[in-house]
Image: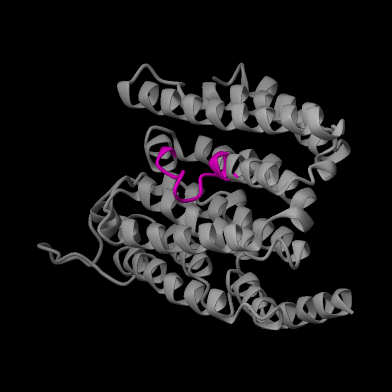
């Protein structure tokens, strides 16, 4: 796999540049296909049935979403003759394309491939799938934001936040919990894209930093289930502390970075008159808060009973926490002052 890493990174960079520089649906569809195919080796990098199953589910789901996108573009080209993404003015075609992009991102009710795929991947490879892979569909939704039906958008976002929270309550596998966390975070990222696309960019940026720090610390601790976290603080106290910071930031507790986009999103939704959407999203976030706090409790606030006289169990010296994990975890510490500045900027844009 190290031989193919430069090819994978180069292809992902090229697809990102296509998304940023073009608004033609055919080019963006080609970029989506390239990013889909380049992630497949990251999923099926081991000859294991779980990895093969995950890659198969991922490919079939992404292929179905791509078929819907090209179907919508074909009908729009026949009726209007336009090929730009901003020229899809038919409401039915816009809704079909929006739902296809929701499949690409993995929102409810099209979320079933996300936990199964993440479960069959390595944590470092999951970072590409949960962050960089979502950038293309997010850019397309950003360009389509004035045309998106807010009723469909709010319904999918509320379902995603609620279902992801419910499914994570009784889950013990760390990777599936991260997948459900990603679904819930993306619901907060997209619920405001019609009214304030700049908040969507901010939320996705902070989400990418925090989820990357979480996955890197989990790989460093070599944990696959919640029960394995009970010994993590004794083995690597600094890494466990960084994991705690990342988890609490994902939960949206102040004054961490995850609180910033949620606060601004609720403020913008209330300003637009979508009070019930804001209230329902807040209630649904309490479900996700529970399993975040459960992870934090098992990793940093609980010590297993010791049967020896020493406070620390005998183990081989563990590796030091690398600079990447430290940097990403520290980036999750954003003061409320930054939130006040962003709130002033968004209000100035509104006027």
Q: Position of residue 173 (x, y in %)?
A: 30, 48
Q: Is residue 236 above or below residue 71?
A: below
Depth check: 339 or 190 in front? 190
Say whether residue 280 is magenta. Answer: no
Q: Is residue 197 above or below residue 339?
A: above
Q: Is residue 294 visible?
A: yes
Depth check: 61 or 309 in front? 61
Depth check: 216 or 248 in front? 248
Q: Position of residue 16 (x, y in %)?
A: 76, 36
**Numbered range of the magenta stretch:** 102-113
* Left or right of residue 189, residue 103 in this image: left
Depth check: 180 or 267 in front? 267
Q: Residue at x 32, y 56 (%)?
A: 167
* Left or right of residue 23, residue 42 in this image: left
Q: Residue at x 41, y 61 (%)?
A: 240
Q: Residue at x 64, y 57 (%)?
A: 327
* Quadrant in the picture for the N terminus: top right
């Amino acid at each position: 796999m190290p031989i193919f890493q430069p090819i994978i990174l180069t292809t992902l960079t090229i697809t990102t540049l296509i998304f940023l520089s073009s608004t033609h649906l055919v080019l963006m569809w080609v970029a989506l296909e390239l990013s889909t195919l380049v992630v497949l080796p990251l999923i099926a990098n081991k000859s294991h049935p779980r990895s093969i199953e995950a890659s198969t589910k991922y490919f079939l789901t992404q292929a179905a979403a791509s078929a819907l996108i090209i179907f919508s573009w074909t009908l729009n080209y026949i009726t209007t003759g336009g090929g730009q993404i901003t020229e899809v003015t038919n409401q039915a075609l816009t809704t079909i394309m929006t739902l296809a992009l929701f499949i690409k991102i993995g929102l409810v009710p099209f979320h079933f491939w996300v936990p199964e795929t993440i479960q069959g991947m390595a944590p470092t490879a999951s970072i590409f799938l949960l962050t960089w892979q979502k950038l293309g569909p997010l850019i397309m939704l950003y360009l389509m934001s004035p045309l998106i039906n807010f009723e469909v958008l709010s319904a999918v976002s509320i379902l995603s936040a609620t279902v992801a929270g419910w499914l994570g309550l009784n889950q013990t596998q760390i990777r599936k919990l991260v997948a459900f966390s990603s679904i819930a975070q993306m619901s907060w990222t997209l619920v405001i894209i019609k009214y304030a696309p700049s908040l969507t960019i901010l939320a996705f940026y902070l989400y990418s930093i925090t989820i990357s720090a979480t996955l890197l610390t989990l790989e460093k601790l070599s944990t696959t289930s919640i029960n394995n976290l009970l010994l993590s603080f004794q083995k690597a106290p600094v890494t466990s502390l960084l994991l705690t910071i990342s988890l609490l930031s994902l939960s949206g507790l102040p004054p961490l970075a995850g609180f910033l986009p949620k606060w601004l999103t609720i403020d913008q939704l209330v300003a637009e008159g979508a009070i019930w959407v804001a209230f329902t999203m807040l209630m649904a976030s309490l479900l996700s808060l529970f399993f975040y706090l459960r992870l934090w409790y098992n990793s940093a606030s609980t010590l297993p009973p010791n049967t020896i006289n020493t406070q620390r169990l005998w183990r081989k010296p563990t590796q030091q926490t690398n600079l990447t994990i430290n940097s990403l975890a520290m980036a999750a510490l954003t003061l409320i002052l930054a939130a006040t500045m962003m709130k002033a900027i968004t209000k100035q844009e509104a006027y």
